[in-house]
Amino acid sequence: MIRLAEKKDYHQLAELRWEHLAEDDILYGETNIAGADKNEFIDEYVSFLNNDSLYKIFVIEQDGIIISAMYVSIIRKVPKPKETESYIAYLTNVHTKKEYRNRGKGTELLSYIKDCLKRIKCELIIAWPSENSVSWYMNNGFTSQNDVMECDL
């Protein structure tokens, strides 16, 4: 079942994020969780989702377990004549449980999200994928035609 995340899901989402970061540490030699306390992280993550998050979190749930999640921030563009309401979306934190990967679940969830965004006049979705996920994004309609400028602060 695809749906928006609810408060009851926040702990599972925090666990999924932790699993993803731990996997990145192993696969890519990163240090996301080195020296971190898992319970403190879970508490902070749940607090963030409860108090500070502006993301819409789309999930696929199977038998009460969240198997995939994608976070979307929707930004309303400044109106112009003849275009009074339009949006862009930022897609981030795309996670699928390891045992459900390569089964089309992420693609199914992204397709659902794209349909939802089209209905609200969203013009485009931006994402910053990892090197290993670029091909999945390209297979799902993303391109790298536009140059995004950045300013590190």
Image (spheres, rainbow, N blue to C red):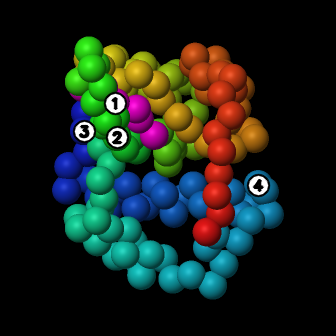
Circle 4 Cα neighbour tier, 10 Å, few/some/many (<14 / 14–19 / ≥20): few
In the picture, which quadrant includes the C terminus? bottom right
**Which comes before the other along the chain, label 1 or label 2?**
2
Q: Secondary structure at mark 2?
A: strand
Residue type pointed to by label 3? Leu
Are dots 1 and 2 in contact, CB under 8 Å? yes
User: What residue does disc 1 label?
Assistant: 87
In the picture, which quadrant includes the N terminus? top left
Q: Nearer the viewer, residue 24 or 47?
A: 47
Circle 2 Cα neighbour tier, 10 Å, few/some/many (<14 / 14–19 / ≥20): few
Distance between the Cα atoms at labels 2 and 3? 18 Å
Q: Main secondary structure of the magenta part?
A: strand
Q: Can you tell which of label 3 and label 4 is closer to the viewer?
A: 3
Q: Can you tell which of label 1 and label 3 is closer to the viewer?
A: 1
Question: From which residue to which does the magenta span run?
Answer: 85-90
- At x 80%, y 63%, the residue is 29
